């Protein structure tokens, strides 16, 4: 994807700048070498392709050999991949490739720990737009690798009428009506509500999806019972790993959590040159 390519180029430019004054003054441009990336803690792997592209931008002839696939569980001390080519490319690309692998594996690992809590449940776990600026395509990919699903990608591919839209428009009904008149009949309309009165308004307006924002378990159950399948239900707001099973048991169709991306820590990997 062009957005990923641009991100890699920007990251390499940020790190290398006008040149790697250490590598370039130690090794000749023709020097060859081999390296391997090792997991320093247990993790769910994600980001192999972007790591490959990073090295290939610096040396198109680089040999990149994954030893696992994205989505695999890797244990501490295991080799993740091998890479061989010009030493300049290996050393200049090392930190950038690791940064991508560490961040994306961190998200995949976090997501897997959430998804494991929902085994046997029918509700879908989905992400949000709370992503690192510029990294959304990659971070949402890592969410899928971890075992969850993507919500809308951006403001352009899904209608979500939130509290500020409702306040500025004068109510749920008018907001839904205006959107319905202007978007394709194939586009679903989602409305965020904060209480059961909002659920009734959204139903009356013909919303396709109703987001139950920051509601407690009893109120979510009541909302699902009120909706009775006339719209998809999404639970959102302060979703914790510990609460997932109980939230899924309410009968909601979707559970969205920004923590899948914004609260994931990077995993620890390192590269060793032979």
Image (cartoon, rainbow, N blue to C red):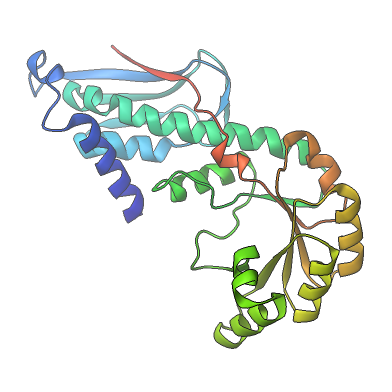
Residue 87 lies in what quarter of the image? top left
Q: Residue at x 30, y 25 (%)?
A: 94
Q: Is residue 110 left or right of residue 92?
A: right
The percent coordinates of residue 74 (x first, y second) are: 56, 23
Q: Residue at x 28, y 30 (%)?
A: 63
Q: Is residue 127 left or right of residue 267?
A: right
The percent coordinates of residue 248 (x first, y second) are: 82, 48
The percent coordinates of residue 132 (x first, y second) are: 45, 43
Q: Residue at x 50, y 46 (%)?
A: 131
Residue 191 lies in what quarter of the image? bottom right
The C terminus - image quarter: top left
Q: Is residue 180 left or right of residue 120?
A: left
Residue 174 lies in what quarter of the image? bottom right
Q: Residue at x 85, y 64 (%)?
A: 196
Report the front residue among 60 and 16.
16
172 up-or-down from 232: above or below = below
Q: How many marks?
A: 0
Q: Which residue in the rendered view is the most extreme toward the bottom?
A: 181
Residue 60 is at least partly visible in this image: no
Residue 213 is at least partly visible in this image: yes
Q: Is residue 68 left or right of residue 126?
A: left
227 up-or-down from 87: above or below = below
33 up-or-down from 140: above or below = above
Report the front residue among 30 and 155.
155
Report the front residue among 131 and 107.
131
Report the front residue among 148 and 266.
266
The percent coordinates of residue 236 (x first, y second) are: 71, 52
The N terminus - image quarter: bottom left
22 up-or-down from 61: above or below = above
């Amino acid at each position: 994807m062009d957005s990923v390519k641009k991100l890699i180029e920007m990251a390499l430019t940020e790190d290398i700048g006008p040149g790697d004054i250490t590598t370039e003054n130690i090794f000749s441009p023709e020097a060859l070498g081999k390296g391997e990336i090792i997991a320093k803690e247990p993790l769910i792997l994600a980001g192999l392709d972007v790591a490959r592209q990073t090295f290939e931008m610096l040396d198109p002839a680089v040999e990149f050999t994954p030893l696992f696939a994205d989505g695999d569980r890797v244990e501490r001390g295991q080799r993740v991949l091998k890479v061989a080519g010009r030493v300049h490319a290996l050393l200049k690309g090392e930190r950038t490739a690791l940064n991508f692998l560490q961040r994306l594996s961190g998200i995949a690992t976090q997501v897997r720990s959430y998804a494991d809590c929902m085994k046997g449940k029918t509700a879908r776990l989905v992400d949000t737009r709370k992503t690192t600026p510029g990294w959304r395509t990659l971070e949402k990919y890592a969410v899928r690798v971890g075992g969850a699903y993507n919500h809308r990608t951006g403001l352009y591919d899904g209608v979500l009428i939130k509290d500020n839209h409702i306040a500025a428009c004068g109510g749920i009904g008018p907001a839904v009506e205006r959107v319905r008149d202007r978007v394709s009949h194939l586009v679903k309309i989602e409305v965020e509500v904060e209480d059961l009165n909002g659920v009734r308004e959204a139903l009356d307006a013909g919303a396709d999806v109703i987001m139950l924002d920051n509601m407690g378990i009893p109120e979510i159950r009541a909302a699902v019972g009120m909706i009775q399948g006339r719209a998809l239900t999404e639970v959102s707001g302060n979703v914790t790993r510990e609460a997932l099973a109980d939230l899924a048991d309410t009968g909601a169709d979707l559970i969205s959590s920004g923590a899948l991306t914004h609260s994931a820590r990077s995993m620890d990997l390192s590269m060793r040159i032979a």
